[in-house]
Image: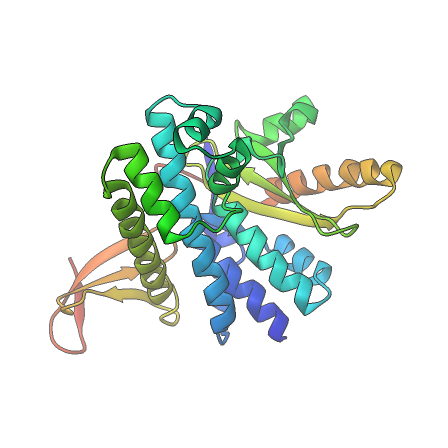
Amino acid sequence: MSKIDKKGLFDPYSVDIQESPEISEILNYSDILTEISKALINYRKENNLTQKDLSKKLNMNQSMISKLESGEYNATLKMLLKISYILVKSSKLFIDIIENIRNRLEYKEEYKNIMSIGKYKCKFDYNFSNVYLFNDKNSVFEAKIVNNQEYKIV
Amino acid sequence: MGENNEIIQMLRDLEADNVWSTNDFYRDIISLLDSGEVQRKFIEVFSKDMKISNINAYNKFELLNKNLTEHQRRILDGNSLYRYEFRRNKKNIKCIFILEKEDGEKILLSAFKEDWSKEKGNASYKTNIPRAIKIYNDLPKKNKEVV
C-alpha cells in the first residue's frame, strides 16, 4: 500500500506567524476535552458497557455521556472526581486523566519546538547532550553534541 | 492576514495530532471563513472534533465510501473517505478528508460551503467528492519501506 509523502502536503511551519494566546487557549482546551473523552470511551470499551449502561452507573442521562464522549460538555473537576470514585472506587481515573492532559500538552509544546526551529528541524534534550535532527517530517536522526556548536550524527 | 495566522496555528496544532492538510484545503478554508467570529467558532469546534478518535459515533462525520465508484475506490487504495460538517445556521461548512487505513492519520483534502437548497446541496457533493479524490490522487506517494 502506498502512503502519502508528507512533503507534498501544506506545511504550516513554512509560514512565520505570531501565535495568538487566545487561539492557543482554544486549542489546549480542545486537548483537555479530548483526553476526558478518551478516558471515558476507553473505560466503557474495556468494560464492555454501552453509553446507556454507563449512564445508569453514573446516574446521568445518556445524552450527558454522549456529550462528555464527544467533548461537547465541559465537565467540572468535581464531576470528574465523582465519576472516578463511582467507576473505579478511587481517584485513579481522575489522576490518569490529569496526567494524560499534562502529557498531551507537554507533547504539543515539544512538537511545536521541534517543528519551528528554522529550516533545520531539530530538538535538544533537556540537558543538551543529545540533538535529534529532522531532514523531513518522517526521518529522524539522532546526533551527539561534540562541543557547544557542532554535532555528529550517531 | 491575521485571520490566516489563526488557521495556520490551528493546522500546526492538528498536525501534532496526526491531522494533516493539503494546500487545497488551506486555500478553501481561508476563502470560506469570512468573519473573525465564525473563524474562532470554527477553530474551536473543528479542532476538538478532529482530535476525537471514534469518529464513527458522531453524525457530524459521514463515511462516503459507499457512494463511490469502483474507480474511485481503487484510487483510495483501502483508505476511507469521510466528510465532516461544521454546522452554523444556514452556513454549514463541509470538509472532506481521508482516514488512512494503516495508521489512522487524517488528511484534510478540501472544504466547501453547503448550498442550502436540497437540489444544489446534492450537486455540491457531486462536484466536491470527485475533486477531493483528484486532490488525493495528485498527492505524491511513497512506499512505506523507504527510510
| Of B24 and B19, the residue lying toward us | B19
Give coordinates of residue B14: x percent, y percent. Answer: 47, 54
Give coordinates of residue B129: x percent, y percent. Answer: 71, 37
Q: Quadrant of the N terminus of chain B?
A: bottom right
- Specify how the rendered protein is coloured: rainbow
Is residue B147 something that shows in the picture? no
Is residue B119 shown above or below A49? Answer: below
Q: Quadrant of the C terminus of chain B?
A: top left
Q: Residue at x 84, y 45 (%)?
A: B116
Is residue A17 shown above or below B123? Answer: below
Q: Is residue A90 left or right of residue A28?
A: left
Is residue B22 shown above or below A112? Answer: above
Q: Residue furthest front?
A: A59
Q: Residue at x 29, y 54 (%)?
A: A103
Q: Residue at x 49, y 76 (%)?
A: A18
Q: Is residue A80 left or right of residue B73?
A: left
| Of B102 and B56, the residue lying toward us | B56
Is residue B115 something that shows in the picture? yes
Give coordinates of residue A111: x percent, y percent. Answer: 35, 60
Q: How many marks?
A: 0
